[in-house]
Image: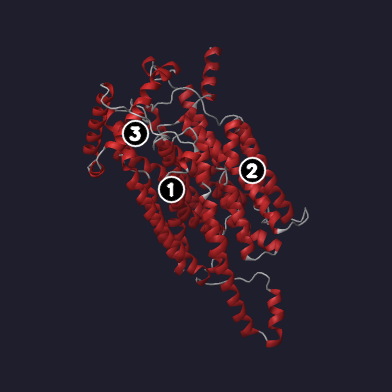
């Protein structure tokens, strides 16, 4: 009896669903950068910064959140638990030092030093992201869309969770939110760092997977709806502290519920049948089948060269049939010595690329620039949400930070779910879902530009959904087009598009236009309300002029809306270029069944 119980515990700690659930909790700590909209007003007032200086801190935060070369490199040479520990320490030191400075417990530093601290603190998130995604994509190679969508969704939800904790603490000191950002994630990561890793065992699609994913999707929707309801109630009604504490306890119960999946699979389900165990890929069989797979890949390379261009224009089933016929002819010709099949230099889309090989591919750069324009504009809204809502006359900026976190979460979960339907059921390129997300964002920017009544509520929905969808779709698409072997390095390079877009939109365009409009309003105000002799003295006291009205972000939002349309066009070009790849990746498995190799091309 004790031996069987020990075996069940061993099964539990090596269960890939336990890894996935723990990775969800890790990812809820990987979205603290989205709290910058709540943190920046505190830093701005205590450090006496203007909007351009705050924008520079925002860019440093975005760089830290997205430049993951260090994380990607260290994850290849260090144990994953060590990479998580490094990320936790960076988070603790960076944001902890900022908290000491803001509260006057440490000497004030120059702006560039503050940028370094924000960069270091937020760069810890790249370790959380890389370890969680690499582990779970390897553990669930046939369910990339749902896995990436859910994991990135919890990263987007981190801002709302932290905000609710801050409301519960009920601290009059707004800087305590920075303290929470420094300490909370560090404690969670240290507790989970030995659980999140690739595990051996059955990696095929199992009958219980669909039910488990459905359960988690349902829980995600419930969690988002609950958080949205709680935030609205807290914003509209003056609640006592006990009620707020109860709300927070229920929130944590919902976050912890997914643990029932690995518990049920490990302790309450029957052992796997022998026939199912036979599906486990033995290393000898892998080696024996390697040459055959290589041959298939070589033949597919020749097919891409030899197939007529009009084949790509045929319906999916007819196109697949014609390609299969051509492939058969090439096999026969090669066997008879009529043609000599030669391998091209470098892999084809759908095979494993190194970062260097991917950087010379047009598809890789289409993803990069589409992500730069789409996610960069969304991140600009997130970083400037406090100033945007204040300029439109809203007093409580925290409600919009929480709302955009929730819609960001739903965008990530929904982006993974619907893009998976697109590729699994229709064998259509996943980037088409990214194109739809970019159209949503273009509409959201229009609402901010014109500042209609209630515009911020609608804008947070569109921008949050569209921005979040990018981070479910891009990692899954990159792994499909460029392989899993160097996924960490590829993903971390693509994420550079995020701070690059933020640098362009927030650091250059938004902050310059905001400060220009603020100075115009300051001149007009002092011209009307002060005597000529005191105008100059009054201007000296306005170190950080404030802008009011839709005009503050009108031009910026119109520019971002237009560039989201450009991103849509780039995504559709990528869709057109990758139709044949997705037909070979998913069309075959739909017609031949799940036993075919995933990257059979």
Query: Under tag 3, what secondary structure?
Result: helix
Residue 311 horizontal/vertical position (percent): 24, 41
Pointer 2: residues within 10 angstroms few (<14), some, or many (20+)?
A: some
Lower position in the chain sequence, tag 2 or tag 1:
2
Looking at the image, which residue is at 27% across and 23% down?
A: 337
Residue pointed to by mark 1 = 367
Q: Nearer the viewer, residue 239 or 323?
A: 323
Q: Residue furthest bottom?
A: 532
Query: Under tag 1, what secondary structure?
Result: helix
Looking at the image, which residue is at 59% across and 70% down?
A: 515
Q: Give the Cα distance between marks 3 and 2.
A: 50 Å
Query: Under tag 2, what secondary structure?
Result: helix
Residue pointed to by mark 3 = 301
Quarter of the image with the C terminus in it: top left
Lower position in the chain sequence, tag 3 or tag 2:
2
Circle count: 3
Residue 308: image quadrant is: top left
Looking at the image, which residue is at 31% across and 27% down?
A: 340
Residue 361: image quadrant is: top left
From the viewer's perspective, tell me whether residue 110 is left or right of residue 169: right
Vertical relation: 207 (above or below) 559: above
Vertical relation: 532 (above or below) 438: below
Q: Mark 2, mark 1: which one is toward the viewer?
A: 1
Vertical relation: 202 (above or below) 157: above
User: Residue 60 bears which disc, if any?
Assistant: none
Residue 477 horizontal/vertical position (percent): 41, 41
Residue pointed to by mark 2 = 184
Pointer 1: residues within 10 angstroms few (<14), some, or many (20+)?
A: many
Q: Give the Cα distance between marks 1 and 3.
A: 23 Å
Pointer 3: residues within 10 angstroms few (<14), some, or many (20+)?
A: many
């Amino acid at each position: 009896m004790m031996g069987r119980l020990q075996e069940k515990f061993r099964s539990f700690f090596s269960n890939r669903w336990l890894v996935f659930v723990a990775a969800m909790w890790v990812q809820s700590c990987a979205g603290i950068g989205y709290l910058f909209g709540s943190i920046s007003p505190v830093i701005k007032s205590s450090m006496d910064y203007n909007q351009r200086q705050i924008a520079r801190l925002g860019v440093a935060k975005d760089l830290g959140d997205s430049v993951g070369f260090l994380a990607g490199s260290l994850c290849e040479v260090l144990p994953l638990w060590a990479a998580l520990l490094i990320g936790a320490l960076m988070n603790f030191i960076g944001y902890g030092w900022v908290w000491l400075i803001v509260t006057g417990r440490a000497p004030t530093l120059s702006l560039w030093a503050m940028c370094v601290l924000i960069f270091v603190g937020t760069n810890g998130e790249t370790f959380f992201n890389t370890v969680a995604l690499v582990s779970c994509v390897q553990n669930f190679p046939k369910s990339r869309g749902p896995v990436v969508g859910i994991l990135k969704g919890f990263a987007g939800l981190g801002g709302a969770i932290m905000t609710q904790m801050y409301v519960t603490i009920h601290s009059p000191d707004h800087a305590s939110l920075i303290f929470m950002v420094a300490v909370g994630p560090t404690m969670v990561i240290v507790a989970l760092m030995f659980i999140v890793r690739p595990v051996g065992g059955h990696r095929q699609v199992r009958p219980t997977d669909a039910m488990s994913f459905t359960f988690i999707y349902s829980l995600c929707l419930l969690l988002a709806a609950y958080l949205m309801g709680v935030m609205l109630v807290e914003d509209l009604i003056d609640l006592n502290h006990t009620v707020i504490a109860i709300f927070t306890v229920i929130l944590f119960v919902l976050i912890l519920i997914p643990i029932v999946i690995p518990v049920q699979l490990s302790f309450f389900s029957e052992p796997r049948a022998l026939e199912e165990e036979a599906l486990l890929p033995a290393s000898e069989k892998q080696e024996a089948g390697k040459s055959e797979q290589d041959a298939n890949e070589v033949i597919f390379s020749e097919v891409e060269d030899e197939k007529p261009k009009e084949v790509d224009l045929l319906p999916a089933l007819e196109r697949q049939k014609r390609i299969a016929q051509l492939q058969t002819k090439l096999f026969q010709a090669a066997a008879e010595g009529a043609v000599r099949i030669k391998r091209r230099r470098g892999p084809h889309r759908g095979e494993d690329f190194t970062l260097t090989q991917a950087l010379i591919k047009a598809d890789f750069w289409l993803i990069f620039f589409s992500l730069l324009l789409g996610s960069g504009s969304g991140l600009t809204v997130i970083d400037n949400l406090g100033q945007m809502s204040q300029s439109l006359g809203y007093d409580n900026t925290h409600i919009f930070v929480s709302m955009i976190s929730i819609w960001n979460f739903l965008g990530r979960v929904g982006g993974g779910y619907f893009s998976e339907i697109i590729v699994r059921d229709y064998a259509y390129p996943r980037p088409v879902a990214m194109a739809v997300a970019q159209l949503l964002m273009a509409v959201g920017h229009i609402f901010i530009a014109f500042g209609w009544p209630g515009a911020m509520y609608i804008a947070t929905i569109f921008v949050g959904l569209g921005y979040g969808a990018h981070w479910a779709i891009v990692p899954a698409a990159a792994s499909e087009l460029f392989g899993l072997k160097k996924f960490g390095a590829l993903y971390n390079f693509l994420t550079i598009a995020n701070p690059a877009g933020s640098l362009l939109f927030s650091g250059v365009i938004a902050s310059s236009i905001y400060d220009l409009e603020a100075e115009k309003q300051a001149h007009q105000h002092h011209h009307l309300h002060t005597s000529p002799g005191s105008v100059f003295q009054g201007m000296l006291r306005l170190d950080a002029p404030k802008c009011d009205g839709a005009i503050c972000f009108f031009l910026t939002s119109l520019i971002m809306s237009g560039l989201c349309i450009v991103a849509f066009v780039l995504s559709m070009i990528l869709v057109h270029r990758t139709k044949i790849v997705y037909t070979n990746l998913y069309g075959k498995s739909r017609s031949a069944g799940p036993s075919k190799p995933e990257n059979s091309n």
